[in-house]
Image (cartoon, rainbow, N blue to C red):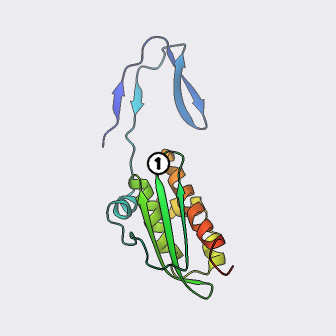
Amino acid sequence: MEAQKIRPQNETSSHEIAGEKTWSGGDASLSTIELRPVTFSAKAIQHGRHPTNAGRMEDPDASASRVGWCGEMMELYLRLDGDRITEASFWADGCLSTMACGDMLTTIARGMTLEGAAAITPEQLIAALDGLPYKSHHCAELSVETLREAIAGRPGR
């Protein structure tokens, strides 16, 4: 996808915040603003559009459900053998990023110990997806928080 270029009005100028250019009132010395489309990695698209671990699990050993701040919902299910995750699945109502995060997280967690799975960070999940747009980072946070809640709230703990 190609970036779209537009001409700013005379009252705009560029300011740099956290390495990104933003626009506000002032000098019109710059002649164009580049609008870049949001892009997803091939891995994020694959996991988001064709999740392999999507589905509610019958009689899980541990589960949790959370709602994110922008309205997406994540349910996570675990089947355990001692302290090792043998099966993991999720159910989500959300965008491509929510689906991709749920699918990748359950893929990563399968075979891990509960302690190892609880240590997964949103940043590790994002890296496993070969990145996510910044506006989708909260989906990784929601997924990881749901996994941690399932681990912490399992019966017999």
Vertical order, 123 against 58 (above or below): above
Vertical order, 75 against 82 (above or below): above
The number of discs equals 1
Quick one: quadrant of the C terminus? bottom right
Camera sees residue 64: yes
| Residue 78 at x, y percent in the picture | 52, 77
Residue located at (40% from left, 23% from top):
32
Residues 101 and 134: in front is: 101
Residue located at (54% from left, 58% from top):
66
- Residue kind at label 1, given as amino acid type: Pro
Q: Is residue 48 left or right of residue 88?
A: left
Residue labelled with disc 1: 133
Name the residue at the top extreme: 10
Residue located at (53% from left, 19% from top):
24
| Residue 90 at x, y percent in the picture | 45, 68
Residues 7 and 145: in front is: 145
Camera sees residue 131: no
Secondary element under disc 1, as helix, strand or loop, is loop
| Residue 74 at x, y percent in the picture | 48, 60
Name the residue at the bottom extreme: 81
| Residue 101 at x, y percent in the picture | 47, 61
Quick one: quadrant of the N terminus? top left
Name the residue at the right extreme: 157
Badge 1 crowding class, 10 Å Cα cut-off, few under 14, some 14 to 19, many 20 or more, is few
Residue located at (39% from left, 43% from top):
38
Residues 99 and 29: in front is: 99
